Amino acid sequence: MTLVVHDFSGHPFQAELSRRLAGLGHDVEHLSSAEYVSGKGHLDIQPNDPSTLHFATVSLSVPFQKYAPLSRLRWEAAYGRAWIKKLRKQRPDAVIACNLPLVSMYRFARYAKRSRLPYVMWHQDIYSSGINDELRRRFPGPIARLGSRVFVRMEGYCARNASHVVAIGDAFKEVYPSWKVAPENVSVIPNWAPLDKVFPVDRANPRSATLFDDDETLRLVYAGTIGRKHNPRLLVELLRSAREMGLSAAMVVVSEGESADELAEIAAHEPDLHLTVLPFQPAAELPNVLGSADALVALLEPDATRFSIPSKVLSYMAAGRPIVGLMPHDNPAAADIAATGGLVVDPDSQGVAEAAKWMESLAGAPDRVRDIGINTRRVAEEKFDADKVAAEFESILASMAPGA
């Protein structure tokens, strides 16, 4: 089968799925956006990759303006057109579409319906929900409500016309009936992290000295996107609370965008805070970056918990380090953190105080850090099975395009 796996973001586990599908004998082109800034996976051919795997990008040579509504809509429409032009030349048997901006996804879904191209909508978030929140922040009520109805209908169209929808959590199934998505066309496959690409390393590794100045410091790392679903101020509060307790603590934030710039400004004005902000690092560096930490920090706001499951937590688990989650307790990622022996607290000031107190138990206790880390990796190895996921996707694809 000739497949296109299009993950707009270029994240690690989506690339891993392409590798596994190519290993099963399919001809797979893995696409991502050239302009979207994010923590990337291994988006190039590795030594043991199958010859049927190919990586490419869709590029407009124009920056993606995430928080400029009108410019973003025009960009998304142009991106959809550019991808459709590429598809017309390729003529794959099927497509797996993941993380695409909603306007781009909608244009593709209309093209796929016209050309009878089977596709899987790999549903990572309820995108119209996030757009609706942004509309309410920026526009008067009547305009926001009208825009909301439009975007909800667009996302419903994409899901309804997909040959199959793969959701990352059961909560998504609450939405599909209102979109008239047939239940038999929906599967739930939780996300994972590639265990052979993200793995435990020594705390003292080739990157640790460039990230932290002092071996005795309690090291905290946040690595990943900081979007509307995250409150970056909690990272500052957490570090301040730890230092006010007398802990010699330092934090490295690996991210880019408006929130990362805001944190970098705080760091520049408060050098005694010991906060460092770095851009996204190469995929090959991720194990060393995460492994330099004594604890890894994750964020999620309460209004995002139903449909958002932070994938960074999965990478943290694979890295085998203690995890602190400032997030609602009912999120699936919170259950994973709790299972590893990490800590989950509410994303507010009281939660920050609890987290700082817990981190005090890690300071100067390398055996405790090691034991929680070992358990964290063990849970990851028990939960993450990329071969099983690939087999599930292959079964779905076979039912969509039986003649291919």
Image (cartoon, rainbow, N blue to C red):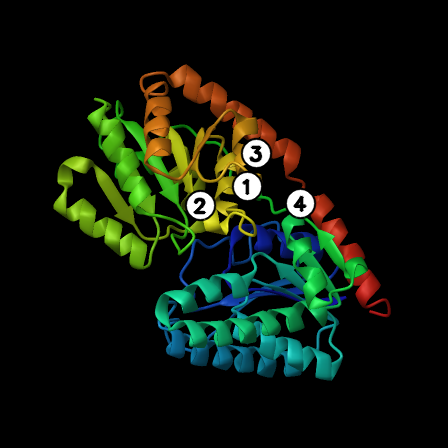
Disc 1 vs disc 3: Cβ atoms closer than 8 Å? yes
Classed neighbour count for the residue bearing mark 2: other residues with Cα under 10 Å, few (<14), some (14–19), many (≥20): many
Pointer 4: what residue?
Answer: 386
Pointer 2: what residue?
Answer: 300
Front disc: 4 or 1:
1
Pointer 3: what residue?
Answer: 335
Task: Using the rendered view, name the quadrant where residue 35 is placed.
Answer: bottom left
* Direction from residue 374 to residue 164 in the image, left or right: right
Count of marks placed on residues: 4
Pointer 1: what residue?
Answer: 331
Sequence-wise, the earlier of marks 2 and 3 is 2
Classed neighbour count for the residue bearing mark 1: other residues with Cα under 10 Å, few (<14), some (14–19), many (≥20): some
From the top left corner, tell me how far across and down residue 161 is, in percent: 72, 72
Quarter placement of the C terminus? bottom right
From the top left corner, tell me how far across and down residue 160 is, in percent: 71, 69
Sequence-wise, the earlier of marks 1 and 2 is 2
Disc 1 vs disc 2: Cβ atoms closer than 8 Å? yes
